[in-house]
Image (cartoon, helix red, strand yellow):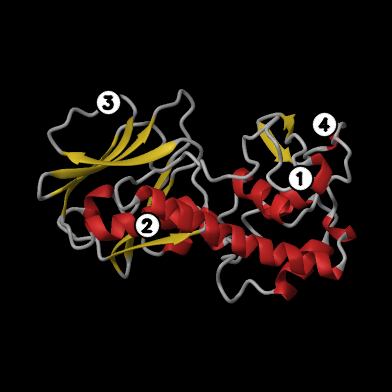
Amino acid sequence: MPELPELDVMQEVLTDRIIGRTIAAVNTFHPGILKTVEPGLDSLVGKSITAISRRGKHLIFTVSDDLHLVVHLMLAGRLVSCQSNTKATKATGCLITFEDGEDLRIIENTTIRRVRVHVVRSPSDVEAIANAGVEPLSSDFTIDYLSQHVLGRKRQLKKLLTDQTIIVGIGTAYADEILFDAKLSPIRYGTTLYEEEVHRLHESIQSVLRWATDEIRAEAGGATLTPHERPFARIYKKTEQPCPDCGTKIAEIRYAQTQTYYCPNCQSQGKSIRDRRAWLTR
Ligand SMILES: [Zn+2]
């Protein structure tokens, strides 16, 4: 799933490519992909995209102050730009055609489709945006804010970091990288953190997201919209590989659909996290 760093680079690439271009047609093909009825897709036709922004894991294509196309790519959605005469495959969920003969397509090549498209008068008409937590790279994301949420309710750190109503834009990949950077266990309860550890977590959230965005931007070079590979990751999907800090083999916890990667030495006092049922409990 694209997270804040990937989405910020996509937003930059899209801004360079499609601002000012006029929409000739918008069509959806996957049943249920369009989550809104009014305003209709046709309301976008003949208008130009004036801005592209990101809120949480949503990309917002603005055509006027009171009309926006909002996209959530979920787990497997990708954006592809191509000539309009290129044949659309079954994986194409939504197709935005510009007057100059190019398309922006939303592709989802999976059996269960989760991508969401909304046409709204205001981005906050999308419930997940209305309920979104703070942007972790904004000035609203203070140590006090994090402290309140960490200490306010008993919950495990990975669940806390990926809760979009508290902090937006962090999914399972960067939550693992952040907790590794902060040398904290993913299943530790926030309520047990010392003040110094909350400071460290705050610092790691911002530094890991900035570092990852720089890496992706350098890798993408303006060329690709959806760089899903993360070759720069230090522990994400690195099971059995040596920890970059101590050489211990990176371990993995699997529970339901979720994988968590961690260093048993750096993050768990040398112990493996054995009780998988403990994971995802509240
Ligand atoms: Zn280690």
Residue 65 at x, y percent in the picture: 31, 70
Marks 1/2: CA distance? Answer: 36 Å
Dot 1 and dot 2 residues touching (CB under 8 Å) = no
Vertical arrangement, residue 167 with respect to residue 157, above or below:
below
Q: Amino acid at mark 4?
A: Arg
Sequence-first disc among 4 and 1: 1
Dot 4 and dot 2 residues touching (CB under 8 Å) = no
Q: Which residue is mark 2?
A: 11
Judged from the image, the secondary structure of the residue bearing numbered disc 3 is loop
Vertical arrangement, residue 88 with respect to residue 270, above or below:
above
Vertical arrangement, residue 158 with respect to residue 78, above or below:
below
Most foreground residue, 260 or 128? 260
Q: Picture quarter containing residue 27?
A: top left
Q: Which residue is mark 3?
A: 89
Q: Which residue is mark 1?
A: 246
Q: Which residue is mark 4?
A: 276
Judged from the image, the secondary structure of the residue bearing numbered disc 2 is helix
Residue labelled 1 has its Cβ within 8 Å of some atom of ligand 1: yes
Q: Residue at x 43, y 57 (%)?
A: 8
